[in-house]
Amino acid sequence: MTQGKKLITVLGATGSIGVSTLDVVGRHPERYGVFALTAHRQVDKLFAQCRHHRPAYAVLDLPEDAARLQGLLDEAGCCTEVLSGSAALAAVASAPEVDMVMAAIVGAAGLVPALAAAKAGKRILLANKEALVMSGALFVQEVVANGATLLPIDSEHNAIFQALPADFRRGDEGYGVTRILLTASGGPFRRKPLEELSAVTPEMACAHPNWVMGRKISVDSATMMNKGLEVIEAHWLFGVPAERIEVVIHPQSVIHSMVAYVDGSVIAQLGNPDMRTPIAHAMAYPERVDSGVQPLDLFAIGQLDFERPDFQRFPCLAHAYRALEAGGIAPAVLNAANEVAVASFLDGKLGFDRIAGVIAATLDAVESQAANSLEIVLEADQRARRLASGFVMQSLN
Ligand code: NAD
Ligand code: MG
C-alpha cells in the first residue's frame, strides 16, 4: 500500500455502517487503504468486499466459513488472509499497521475488539454504541490511558462533537455547556394508537421513516431504546450528567443534535439523514472530505418540528435513564436484556409491546454492583441474558 495512506480496519464491514464506510473509503483511494474487513457469517458479501478493497486480512466468526472464503479468494487471485474467531477480531483491531478502526459490529459482540483498539491507542470510529453503554467507565479509561482517540459515528453524538468547542475536554464544566439536546425521529410508531402496538410485526418495526439501518437498531429506534442507549453513550463520551441530557423528538431527522450554552446559544449540526456524513467527518477529522451525501436542501424540507417524548409510549427510554442513574453494571444489564428481547421479537417469540417489560424485569432482578473490570461487565451481560430469556419464556405462557 502507498505510504501516507491511512489504513483502516472495518469491524462489521458487511453491515449498514460497514457498507457506508467502504463507500467513503472508495471515494478517496489516495487517502485510505483497507487493512482488514470483518463479518459474522456473510461469506459472499465479505468476498465481494475483499475483491474490491484488497485488505491484508478478513475475519469471520467460524473456521468453516473462513475456509470457504479463503478458497474463494485464492481462486480469485486475491491475497487476503482469512482468520476466524474473537481473538482474530481483536488482533486486526490492534495491529501496528492500523491507523483507525471502524467499530461497527452490532451489540455486545463488538465490545472486546473495540477495547482492543483502545488499548492499542488507535483512532476509534465508534458506531457500536452498545460497547460504551456496557462498559463506559472502563472504555473511557482505556482510551485515556493509551492515548487512543474516540470519535463518535452515531449521528447525534457526531453532531454534538461538532457543536462543542474544538478543545472540549470530557466532563470539564469550564466550557459553559448547560444541556445536550439529543434529537430523535420518534421512529415509525410515534403516532400509532397504543392499543395497536401489540400487533406490530418485525417488518413494520424495521421500516424506519428516515434511516436505513440494521434490524436490531431499527427495532431499537421503534421502541426508542436506541435513544436511551444514546443518552448513556452521550454521558460517557462527553461527561455530561443524565439530568442535563434531554431528548427532543424531531421527526424530520435534519438536526442531528444540539448543544446549549450558558449564554443562551444553542449550536446545532444539520444534514441529510445519511451516515456517510458522520463517517467521513470522523475519518478525515480535523479535515473534511467529500462523503457522497447530497447537499441539504432546506427549501425542499420546508419545516422543522419538535416534540417532547412521551415516556408512557416509550417506556424503554425511562428504563435507560434509570440504568444510567443506577450506574455500575446496570447499563450492561439493560443492554443485554434489550438484545435478548429484540432478538426474541425479531424471531416472533415476543410481542413488540412486551420488549420494555422484559427489560424492566431484568433490571429489577439484578442487584447493583460496581463495574470495576471487564470480567464483571461480561459476567453481568451473561447473567442478564439468562434472566431476560427466562422472562421471554414466561411471557409466552
Ligand atoms: P448491521 O446489522 O447492518 O451490521 C452488523 C455487522 O456486525 C455485520 O457486518 C455483521 O456481520 C457483524 N456482526 C453481527 N454480529 C456479530 C458477531 N456476533 N460477531 C462479529 N460480527 C458480528 O448493523 P448496523 O446497522 O450497521 O449497526 C452497527 C452498529 O452501529 C450498531 O451498534 C448500531 O447501533 C450502530 N449504529 C448504526 C447506525 C445505522 O445507521 N445503521 C447508526 C448509528 C449507530
Ligand atoms: Mg443515532
Image (cartoon, grey):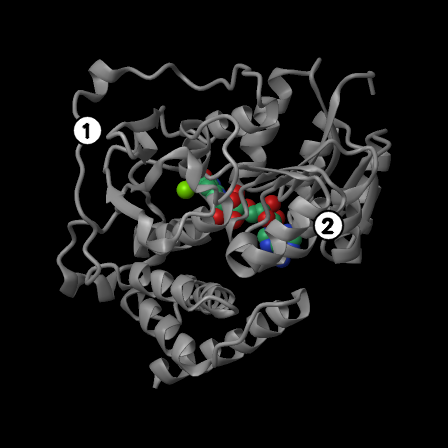
Query: Which numbered circle lies on residue 304?
Result: 1
Res 219 visible: no
Which quadrant of the structure image shows residue 360?
Answer: bottom left
Q: What residue type is labelled 1?
A: Leu
Residue toward you, 74 or 234:
234
Res 206 visible: yes
Quadrant containing the N terminus is top right
Left or right: residue 190 versus residue 326 is left
Query: Which numbered circle lies on residue 116?
Result: 2
Packing grade of label 2 (10 A; few <14, some 14-19, many >=20) is: many
Disc 2 is placed on an element classified as helix
Quadrant containing the C terminus is bottom left
Is ligand 2 less than 8 Å from the beta carbon at label 1?
no
Q: Where is residue 137 in the image (x, y as percent from the top left)?
A: 57, 57
* Most distant residue in the front direction: 174
Q: Where is residue 296 in the image (x, y as percent from the top left)?
A: 33, 17
Left or right: residue 266 versus residue 34 is left
Label 2 vs label 1: CA separation?
41 Å
Q: Where is residue 292 in the image (x, y as percent from the top left)?
A: 49, 17
Residue drawn where x is 31% and y is 33% of the image: 261
Disc 1 is placed on an element classified as loop
Q: Where is residue 41 in the image (x, y as percent from the top left)?
A: 66, 52
Which quadrant of the structure image shows residue 30?
Answer: top right
Residue drawn where x is 38% and y is 85% of the image: 394
Q: In this view, does 72 lie above or below 388?
A: above
- Mark 1 or mark 2, which is nearer the start of the sequence? 2
Q: What residue type is labelled 2?
A: Ala
Residue drawn where x is 78% and y is 17% of the image: 4
Q: In this view, does 48 lie above or below 362?
A: above
